[in-house]
Amino acid sequence: MSSDWAASALGWWADAGVDTIVGEEPRDWLKPASKSPAAAPLAFSAPAATMPDTLEAFQAWLLGGDMPLASPAPRIGPAGDPGAGLMVLTDMPSADDVRAGHLLSGEAGALFDRMLAAIGRGRDTIYLAPLSPTRTATGTLDAASARALAGIARRHVGLAAPRALLLFGDTCAKILLGSAVAGTRGRWHEIDTEGGKIKTLVTIRPEKLLNQPALKRLAWEDLQRLKEGLTE
């Protein structure tokens, strides 16, 4: 294990307010949290025939195909290793990402890297992808675009076939699970894809963690649940 990795992981632990590796009380990580029922996730509405059926072709389609969001912003596609077993999905490129040319850049990206290091991963050992490869002018999605992107995301996840999927933020959670982060984090879910069911976890997006550092402890819990789920 490199000293850089260890320093990065310790930095995230400190940011998260963690001062002990093992809690004093035992915890059943597999026990579902008590939550109110979520709304139904958005249905698969993008015409399946218009989307490629291999991952390589799908990645190329994301960058040059007919997508539901009309925007002059450049497209930013997936990055990392699709065979790594962990797929991370974010909603769309930020303004900083558009300037940098890759997802999760700047301060949010630095925090994301520390989050990965805390579970023994790096960008080369995950598959990072956007719901939409282009950013809207407002940075938000309307209902019609969200419905179309739900189908696109399910095809993408099914083709990548990860052991686990991590969703960042309310938009991804609402589109694929039917409820925001507050109603979905803290327990495992399954989403249906054409390639089968994929176990899925939700956490808080790095941009929000920067603005509300007190939430880092919750994100730390999510990361530990993710790490355990990947080793089962």
Image (cartoon, rainbow, N blue to C red):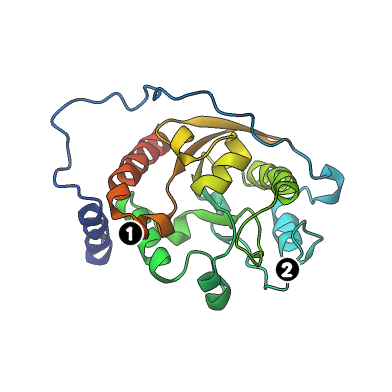
Q: Amino acid at mark 2?
A: Ser
Tag shown at residue 114? 1
Q: Is residue 38 above or below residue 102?
A: above
Q: Position of residue 75 (x, y in %)?
A: 67, 68
Q: Is residue 95 left or right of residue 155?
A: left
Q: Position of residue 174 (x, y in %)?
A: 58, 40
The quarter of the picture where residue 203 lies is top left
Tag shown at residue 169? none
Q: CA distance from mark 1 to mark 2?
A: 31 Å
Report crowding for label 1: few under 14, some 14 to 19, many 20 or more residues within 10 A (C-alpha).
Answer: many
Helix, strand or loop at label 2? It is loop
Name the residue located 53 percent from the left edge and 65 percent from the top edge.
103
Q: Amino acid at mark 1?
A: Arg
Name the residue located 63 percent from the left edge and 42 percent from the top edge.
175
Name the residue located 55 percent from the left edge and 71 percent from the top edge.
95
Report crowding for label 2: few under 14, some 14 to 19, many 20 or more residues within 10 A (C-alpha).
Answer: few
Q: Give the mark, 1 or 2, whose residue is nearer the N terminus.
A: 2
- Can residue 166 be seen here? yes
The quarter of the picture where residue 56 lies is bottom right
Residue holding disc 2: 71
1 vs 2, front mark:
2
Q: Is residue 223 left or right of residue 165?
A: left
Name the residue located 30 percent from the left edge and 50 percent from the top edge.
216
Q: Position of residue 73 (x, y in %)?
A: 68, 72
Q: Position of residue 178 (x, y in %)?
A: 60, 34
